[in-house]
Image: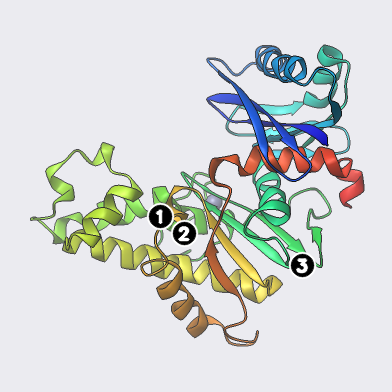
Amino acid sequence: MKYAIGIDLGGSHTLAAIVDERGRILSKFKRELTAHDPSYVVGEIAKVVGKACRALRGKNLVGIGLGSPGNIDGKSGVIRYSPNFGWHDVPLGSLLFKKLDQRVHILNDARCAALGEYEHGSGRGTKDFVLITLGTGIGGGIIAGGRLVMGAAMGAGEIGHHQIRPIDGFVCNCGKTGCFEAQASGTGMLRHALALASSFPRSVLLAGDPAAWGSKMIREAMLAGDGHAAATWDRWLADLAIGVSNIIAFVNPEVIALGGGAGQADKRILAAPLTEMVDKLTTMSPRGQTKIISAKLGNDAGAVGAATLAFRGGIKALR
Ligand SMILES: [Zn+2]
């Protein structure tokens, strides 16, 4: 059996997973990140990779992959821009090479997750697949004709920042108004709840502190019959449908998987009504041809995808 190390780098932690060639995680090593300067982050990554390498001693390690937030030049391993870390032009690849004496293949974290789901999760068996991660933001990755779409400057797949409500939408973290991310992420759901609050004075959500609201809480309140939560869910679902139908118009995938916390709801309240709404908004592409499902790998998608990147030999091999 062959193995790769998949590293998931987030704003608050870094994790290295030992993954076998069938996409199974054998073990994980995690460290919290308390600062964001590159030399510290590289040192923490080296610690989790060191633990994984020791655990793998004597086994066949094929390579190391890493998923990081931001726009990344995958060939040189330079993080051009990462708002999560406040980084501009950080040569993460060469810093890691100096520290580990081993090449680390680097790709945007959402694209890594899409690659992981495509090869080992909800996209298995397809050639045209899109992962939409509905978390605090919206990340995504597009596989078309069996290849991960990266674009001319590694910017393809930034589906969170296409505008769906440019006139009356919420202001997005990126500065635009009504981005798909601002409207349909888990955070977008909370913003819909806040916007609707004054119409529902007896809402069960309002009995608690809005700072503690989460998409799961809203979903549970809706299922328990709360009108505020139901109206929130409807608005959120309507915005999600616009973005999903746009993606179908652009790339006509066989499967769209919804990842992240907000993507894990029962199909009766998420995938089924969403599919119906998306069909109404699908005009020129054939209707009813894209399966909308929940993603399967959960929080492991990024690490499994980073390992998949290493198994495949990095960005050059993907192109
Ligand atoms: Zn945006």
- Which residue was labeled with disc 1? 170
Q: Earlier in the sequence, mark 1 or mark 2?
A: 1
Residue 182 seen anywhere in this rendered image of the structure: yes
Looking at the image, residue 43 lies above or below residue 213: above
Q: Nearer the viewer, residue 45 or 180?
A: 45
Q: Amino acid at mark 1?
A: Phe
- Which residue was labeled with disc 2? 178
Q: Give x and y (percent) for residue 268.
A: 37, 70
Q: Earlier in the sequence, mark 2 or mark 3?
A: 3
Q: Is residue 94 left or right of residue 281?
A: right
Badge 2 element: loop
Q: Which mark is residue 126?
A: none
Q: Which mark is residue 127?
A: 3
Q: Earlier in the sequence, mark 3 or mark 1?
A: 3
Q: Give x and y (percent) for residue 52.
A: 72, 20
Looking at the image, residue 119 lies above or below residue 79: below
